[in-house]
Image: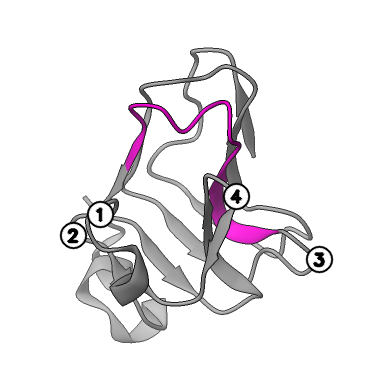
Amino acid sequence: MAVIGNEVTGAGHPVSGEVRKGIEIEGNSVGLTIANNIAVGNGLTTNSANIGTSATSVQGSTADYNLVFGGGVLYVWNGVAYSSLDDLRGRHGHGEQRDPRRSPLGRAGIG
């Protein structure tokens, strides 16, 4: 699912099996929040991830309460790939990195 412009669609939904980014903010979409999503097994190509932003859309954008697991890279944020939420702290508040079948967020459907 890609978000282009200032419209956010699909927030709060599970995304899995996408070859590129499962959830991607691109273009000049600044100041957006990527929250309450389950992104599992996405990002199976180079420079792809479960969740990502382009360099032109990262300004003021945040990610919070997402559950990410598997796939290639968890996040690509401003061109930097992160394979661990611990490496991304400060940009992602309350997310989890674990199998959604073993997570209270995943079992509850998040949010």
Q: Would residue 102 appear left or right of 77 to someone viewing this image?
A: left
Say few, some or many: other residues with alpha carbon within 10 Å of mark 4 (under 14 / 14 to 19 / 20 or more).
some
Identify the mark at residue 65; answer none if there is no mark.
Answer: 1
In reply to whether residue 53 is colored magenta, the answer given is yes
The part of the image, by quadrant, that contains residue 70 is bottom right
The answer to the question of whether label 1 and label 2 lie on touching residues, with beta carbons closer than 8 A, is yes
Residue 20: image location, x then y, percent: 75, 55
Q: Which amino acid lies under the numbered mark 4 shown in the image of this protein? A: Gly
- State the SS at label 3: loop
Q: Earlier in the sequence, mark 4 or mark 2?
A: 4
The Cα atoms of the two marked residues, 3 and 2, are separated by 27 Å
Q: Which amino acid lies under the numbered mark 3 shown in the image of this protein? A: Thr
Residue located beneath label 4 in the image? 79
Q: Is residue 52 above or below residue 103?
A: above
Q: Please report the residue visible at 62 percent of the width from the left and 53 percent of the height from the top.
A: 22
Q: Would residue 98 appear left or right of 104 to someone viewing this image?
A: right
Q: Nearer the viewer, residue 68 or 15?
A: 68
- State the SS at label 2: loop
Q: Main secondary structure of the magenta part?
A: loop
